[in-house]
Image (cartoon, grey):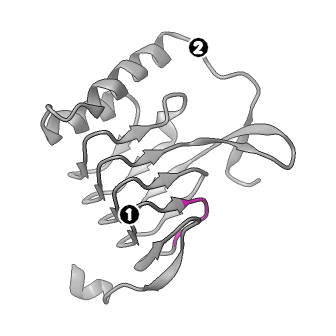
Amino acid sequence: MNNKTIIEKPPYDIRRIWRKVCMVISKFSLISPSIRLKMLKMGGVKVKGRSFIGANVVFDGIYPNLIEIGEGAVITSGTCILSHFYNTSDRRFYAGKVKIGKKVFIGMNTLVVNAVNIGDYAVIGAGSIVNRDIPAGEIWAGNPARFIKKAADVKSIE
């Protein structure tokens, strides 16, 4: 497993408590999107530039520092992004980097449940379960997420 590390024992220290507090506050629907982004950054999530994170978006509470969100990304309400997961073949927990590219749209109630790269300008349909890499400029949806079609020409989007 190239970009994944085995988790023997999750860290239980003051940083994890602080990250958890920041993550819980960021989920509230009554705070503004700009405060939400600040709380996520304080909690360890790497957010580049201006992005939109909807209410009730859940980020990994153990390893939020392994999640990176590109500029202009839109992550809608109810989405869950995990950077640690259980491998059934060897019965071990792994942690890996989740990278969401720039100007990605992730539909409502989507689950990202593996160490994945979601390419720039990709679109993930609502209710999808993403467990593998998604190339740039493609539309994916379903459980598990499957290729639907190529998005519009990326140069015309910019």
> How many residues crowd mark 2 within 10 Å: few (<14), some (14–19), many (20+)?
few
- Classify residue 92 as left or right of residue 111: right
Q: Which residue is mark 1?
A: 126
Magenta region includes residue 131: yes
With respect to residue 33, does 51 lie above or below? below
Of helix, strand and loop, which one carries label 1?
A: loop
Task: Using the rendered view, name the quadrant where residue 34 is placed.
Answer: top left
| Whole-percent x, y for residue 157 in the image | 23, 81
Foreground residue, 110 or 50?
110
Q: Which residues are magenta?
A: 130-134
Q: Residue at x 31, y 84 (%)?
A: 154
- Please, what is the three-letter code of the amino acid marked with disc 2? Tyr
- Classify residue 150 as left or right of residue 26: right
The answer to which of marks 2 and 1 sits earlier in the sequence is: 2
The residue sitting at the right extreme is: 90
Q: Residue at x 83, y 39 (%)?
A: 91
- Classify residue 91 as left or right of residue 65: right
